[in-house]
Image (tube, rainbow, N blue to C red):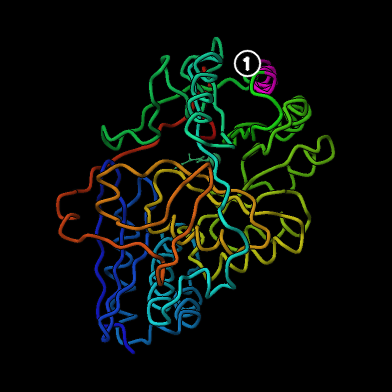
Amino acid sequence: MKITDAKVFVGGPGKNYVTLKILTDQGVYGLGDATLNNRETLPAAYLRDYLIPAIIGMDPRNSEDIWQFLYRGAYFRGGPIAMAAYGAIDMALWDIKGKIAGLPVHQLLGGRSRDGALVYAHAAGSDLEDLADSVAARIEEGYRAVRVQCGIPGMPGAGYAVPGTRGARHYITDFGGLRPSVEYWDSGRYLRYMPGALCELRDRFGPELKILHDVHHRLMPREAAAFARAVEPADLFWLEDPTPAEDQDALRLLRQHSTVPVAIGEVFQSLWQCNRLIKQELIDFIRVAVTYAGGITPVRRIVDLAGMHHVRTGFHGAPSHSPVSMAAQAHLNAWAPNFGIQEYLVLGTAECDALFPSDHRMEGGLFHVSDAPGLGVDFDEALAARYVYAPGSHPVVRLEDGTMWDY
Ligand code: KDG
Ligand code: MG
């Protein structure tokens, strides 16, 4: 069996999904997702200009060797652009492997360990009342776990991922062009306000709701430790990215002062970035994604390492992931013995469902993976021609005096 060609599509309904389709001499094809939010044309170019020409003629069944060829063969290893491109190839090869075996990918990994995978939705509000309405709406929709982000009184701009006005929706990507908008941050105001707000939500919604909160890398280690201690009465399911992830030793201070579960890793691109945090048991959930962590092949290794150290999975699932990588993660979630939770944002607009048909389904706050062979998701190329790439940007964050801060 041979890879004969591959095509890359950039675009989608309100998103620049980077979709890879690998074709073979036996008519079977595989799909992958290389979407790197707001940098989408780069993994697409890496695939088109370098990787696709190099893998044509290879046997797609040898996904391990092809992964090693891409990663070890590059000399300059890793980085989010390259890993997203490798990730897409790897997903597509697992898709092909499943289709020729007549088995869903989770069966190739070891089968189902659960009936449905717990997911969390996002709730956000310009203030606490607005946030509480948003949480109530998610519960009404059937979610059992909700990530909560809230505007901070007196903070110009709204903080991470919160709308500026009541009832509005917040979109992280601004398709107004490549010059980012600016949000303002004040750690003091956040530290004074947010622990009380989280405790108030716990009181209002009771003990059963799983509440998650994302600090988005914005606190110093000492502040993060104090914050983690202050939010303990809110009984969080997890506290995400309390500090910038580069300084991994910083997590030790938080650990010494609090037992709040910590989730980290959505920006990690390899096992090596996860290794120390997992082995030293400084985190409770690993947040990598199958796209920019390089595909199912390396993420499966991360999951196994995590399992040896009581660390559970909580894969990244921001709206920039297409239904292809969400399907790849769903298969890992169905299998992983140390599965924790999956971030899930409703991609299920009619346009998105038409572009990526599948019978994966969400019900009662659980994601039920399809038993169709391979990844169980398809791609309508004719429909894809309707969508064109639109440049977009994340906001940047500054302190009130103009100092750049962590987004
Ligand atoms: O592209 C950046 C987003 O993916 C990120 O801001 C989302 O933090 C995020 C999350 O937890 O989903
Ligand atoms: Mg996050």
Which residue is under mark 1? 189
- Quarter occupied by residue 99: bottom left
Q: Nearer the viewer, residue 380 or 177?
A: 380
Query: Quick check: is 202 in the magenta stretch?
Result: yes
Please state which amino acid type lies under the numbered disc 1. Arg
Residue 270 horizontal/vertical position (percent) = 57, 62
Residue 56 horizontal/vertical position (percent) = 30, 82
Residue 80 horizontal/vertical position (percent) = 46, 57
The total number of labels drawn is 1
Q: Residue furthest bottom?
A: 1
Residue visible at 58% across and 37% down in the picture? 144
Residue 53 horizontal/vertical position (percent) = 28, 78
Residue 168 horizontal side relative to residue 45, left or right: right
Label 1 SS = helix
Query: Quick check: is 365 in the magenta stretch?
Result: no
Query: Does the magenta stretch mainly form a helix, a strand or a loop?
Result: helix
**Taking the image as four quarters, which one is ligand 2 found in?**
top right
- Quarter occupied by residue 74: bottom left
- 186 shown above or below 236: above
Q: Residue furthest right?
A: 256
Residue range of the region highlighted in magenta in the rendering = 191-203
Label 1 crowding class (10 Å Cα cut-off): few <14, some 14-19, many 20+? few
Residue visible at 56% across and 72% down in the picture? 109
- Quarter occupied by residue 45: bottom left
Residue visible at 62% across and 69% down in the picture? 301
Residue 379 horizontal side relative to residue 276, left or right: left
